[in-house]
Image (spheres, grey):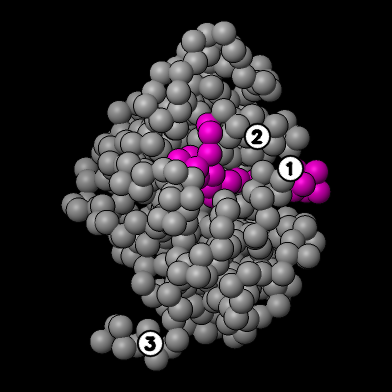
Amino acid sequence: MAEEQENKLNIPNLQILGQDDSPLFQGAGSDAKSVTYPKKFSNHPGFKQVFQPGKLTFGLMAPFKGYPDSQIADVSDLFDYAKAAEAAGFDALWIRDVPFYDQYFGDVGQGLDPIATLGALAMTTDKIVLGSAGFILPERNPIYVVQAAVSIDRLSNHRFLLGLVSGDRKNEFKAFGRDWNERGEIFREGWDLTKKSLTHPNRLHFSGNYYGKLTGSLSIVPQLEDGYSMPLVAIGRCRQELSWLANEPDAWIWHGIGEDETASAVKKLNDLNEDGNWHPFGYQNFVELLDDPDAPCELFNKIYLRGGAKSMAQFWRKQRKEGLNHVIINFKPTKRPIADCLADMEKYVFPEVNKD
């Protein structure tokens, strides 16, 4: 019945990079344990702005506008809309890593190299946080990922969040000479090398199965400035166990979760936490924002949100009360001009969601 309704409403088959539909949250978890805000990010502007205990912040996925009838968006206005989103009150801009056009997926994100795009955004925006959503570790050498991440962090005055994914496009893995069936293991090793390169960049030692060996004769450049750490964000399941996601990433942004599952997810993650630090939880939504701000809000396939701005505000307000910390909005299915969407978000959504 639900499937018939979705077909009637013309819900498109949209894909998010890193998508994994495996069931995760079985059981509600225990009562919340006491966790603390991670001290290493107490002075990091990007982490502090996006992840605030008890609050829900909003990110916008590139190309920062709707393009429902196109597989490849026109991005000539990308930086204009980035600045408009910043002025409207969005907390973060997220950039995807899509090296190929694959007809099966039918979407290339912003269609520009993510590192070049993030560097340009660092120079054309002032306060909004910039995030990668995310660099595909099995398709990128972690040394280059770290070099790009630290450079963007410096250029943006520490407004950068390093999001990493395992990848979900089989043809890409073939093109890069990677084994599709080993993507979870490749990701884990890439994550470990990324983390070590950030935290111990001098005379680096590393030995692995997928990225070779470093014997201590080389040091990474550039390096993080004294007193700053790099937030590592897992985007999607990353082919990892929930216990890993609850402890290793500094934050986790997923997708495909029902509106009545958020509280259970947060409790389960908290129950599995072992380091005593707060690890915020967020997710992504495709959003079709309708003209009528009072139009009812409905969630389809646990990922596609359709409705008016006022009802969406109440939807996200409830999600915030259930423990959601950040939502990334992808306006791809929205037909309205992005200026109207930003105005609705600023007028109806942002002032309402974090009340009481």
Q: For the image shown, how many numbered marks are present on the structure?
A: 3
- Give the residue at mark 2: 148
Residue 153 seen in the figure: no
Compared across the picture, whether 80 is left or right of 332 comes to right
Q: Observer-nearest residue: 45 or 328?
A: 328
- Give the residue at mark 3: 7
Residue 171 vertical placement versus 119 (above, below)? below
Question: Viewer-nearest of labels 2 and 3?
Answer: 2
Q: Amino acid at mark 3?
A: Asn
- On the image, the x and y values in percent for residue 263 come to 32, 54
Secondary structure category for the residue under label 2: helix
- On the image, the x and y values in percent for residue 44 come to 62, 31
Secondary structure category for the residue under label 3: helix
- On the image, the x and y values in percent for residue 332 come to 58, 71
Compared across the picture, whether 353 is left or right of 321 comes to right
Q: Amino acid at mark 2?
A: Ala
Q: Which residues are magenta?
A: 119-142
Residue 63 vertical placement versus 95 (above, below)? below
Marked residue nearer the N-terminal end (1 or 2): 1
The reply to whether the C-beta atoms of the residues labelled 1 and 2 are less than 8 Å apart is no
Q: Which mark is residue 119?
A: 1
Marked residue nearer the N-terminal end (2 or 3): 3
- On the image, the x and y values in percent for residue 338 come to 70, 72
**CA separation, marks 3 and 1?**
40 Å
Residue 312 seen in the figure: yes
Compared across the picture, whether 281 is left or right of 347 comes to left
